[in-house]
Amino acid sequence: MRIIRKSAAIAAALALGALAGCAQDFLSAGNIEPGAEPGTYRWRTYGDIATPHDSDQAEELRLTALARLMRETPGCADGYRITDREALLRQVTVVGAEVHDIYYSIDCR
């Protein structure tokens, strides 16, 4: 019984560590581009089997990564708002998992 509890605790710690690394993954795997108007941007990131596009928990991780990115973006350190979000299916893997490109339109004006 004691071994099972210890194994469960280790598994939970590893899962939390993996989720903490997701915010950095969103930044390194995505990109941000200037929008059509000055002070606007479009950020592309992703949703996959570990961080689905329609998961509230995964969205919280993406928004944390976005906040970090916007602090470093010229003209956005004082605040921004998301004006649009669009998830587009990029592919379905061989095991049936969906991978989405997720686009956020951002206004720093």
Image: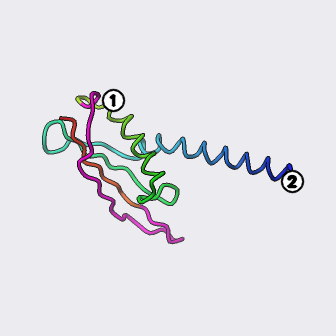
Locate residue 100, reporting x and y percent.
39, 60
Q: Which residues are magenta?
A: 76-99
* Upstream in sequence: badge 2 or badge 1: 2
CA–CA distance between discs 2 and 1?
A: 49 Å
Q: Is residue 60 left or right of residue 105?
A: right
Q: Nearer the viewer, residue 16 or 24?
A: 16
| Residue located 48% across and 51% down the image | 57
Which corner quadrant of the image does residue 76 belong to? top left
Hey, which residue is sitting farthest left in the picture? 37
Locate residue 34, reporting x and y percent.
21, 41
Query: Would you say residue 16 sits in the magenta stretch?
Result: no
| Residue located 36% across and 57% down the image | 101
Locate residue 74, reporting x and y percent.
25, 29
Three-letter residue code for mark 2: Met
Q: Secondary structure at mark 1?
A: loop
Q: Is residue 61 left or right of residue 81?
A: right
Which corner quadrant of the image does residue 55 belong to? bottom left
Camera-near label (2 vs 1) is 2
What is the quadrant of the C terminus in the image?
top left
Query: Would you say residue 94 sits in the magenta stretch?
Result: yes
Which corner quadrant of the image does residue 69 belong to? top left
| Residue that mark 2 sits on | 1
Three-letter residue code for mark 1: Glu
| Residue located 22% across and 36% down the image | 108
Q: Secondary structure at mark 2?
A: loop
| Residue that mark 1 sits on | 72
Locate residue 13, reporting x and y percent.
67, 43
